Amino acid sequence: MCRSIKTLRRADGPASDEEIAAAALQYVRKVSGYRAPSQRNTRAFDAAVSEVGRASRRLLEQLEKARNEPAQRTSRARA
């Protein structure tokens, strides 16, 4: 979607808050079509950046937990 957004899930450690905020900003810029919103749209734009950033942090935290947990095997009952 946007080439300037880099992958934030890495083996060398968790993404910083600054990296997540920058990726969220790039995403909202791309989706909205604004590099900088008009004064009238600033509140909505900033709220979207915050929401995308929070959602990104939650995603990365959940992926980290899933990666560090042992795989659970499920058995299938045969009829």
Image (cartoon, rainbow, N blue to C red):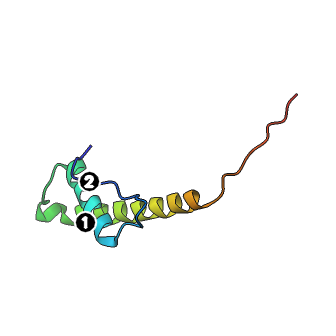
| 3 left or right, relative to 70 | left
In screen coordinates, is 40 left or right of 71? Answer: left
Question: As rendered, which of 13 and 31 lies closer to the eye?
Answer: 13
Q: Which mark is residue 60?
A: none
Position of residue 46 measured from the top left corner of the image (x, y, whole percent): 25, 66
Q: CA distance from mark 1 to mark 2?
A: 18 Å
Q: Residues within 10 Å of mark 2 (few under 14, many from 20)?
A: some
Tell me if 45 is positioned left or right of 67 in this view. left
Indicate which disc, 1 or 2, sits on the residue closer to the N terminus: 2
Q: Residue at x 85, y 30 (%)?
A: 78
Q: Is residue 43 above or below residue 3?
A: below
The residue lying furthest to the bottom in this view is 17
Q: As rendered, which of 37 and 6 lies closer to the eye?
A: 6
Q: Position of residue 16 (x, y in %)?
A: 34, 70
- Disc number at residue 46? 1
| SS class, disc 2 | loop
Point out the residue furthest to the front here. 12
- Quadrant of residue 15 in the image? bottom left
Q: Residue at x 70, y 51 (%)?
A: 72
- Residue 63 is situated, as x and y percent measured from the top left of the image, at 51, 57
Q: Residue at x 11, y 61 (%)?
A: 38
Furthest toward the right, the residue is 79
Secondary structure beneath label 1: helix
Q: Which residue is mark 2?
A: 5
> Which quarter of the figure is the N terminus placed in?
top left
User: 10 Å neighbourhood of mark 1: few (<14), some, or many (≥20)?
Assistant: some
- Three-letter amino acid code at disc 2? Ile
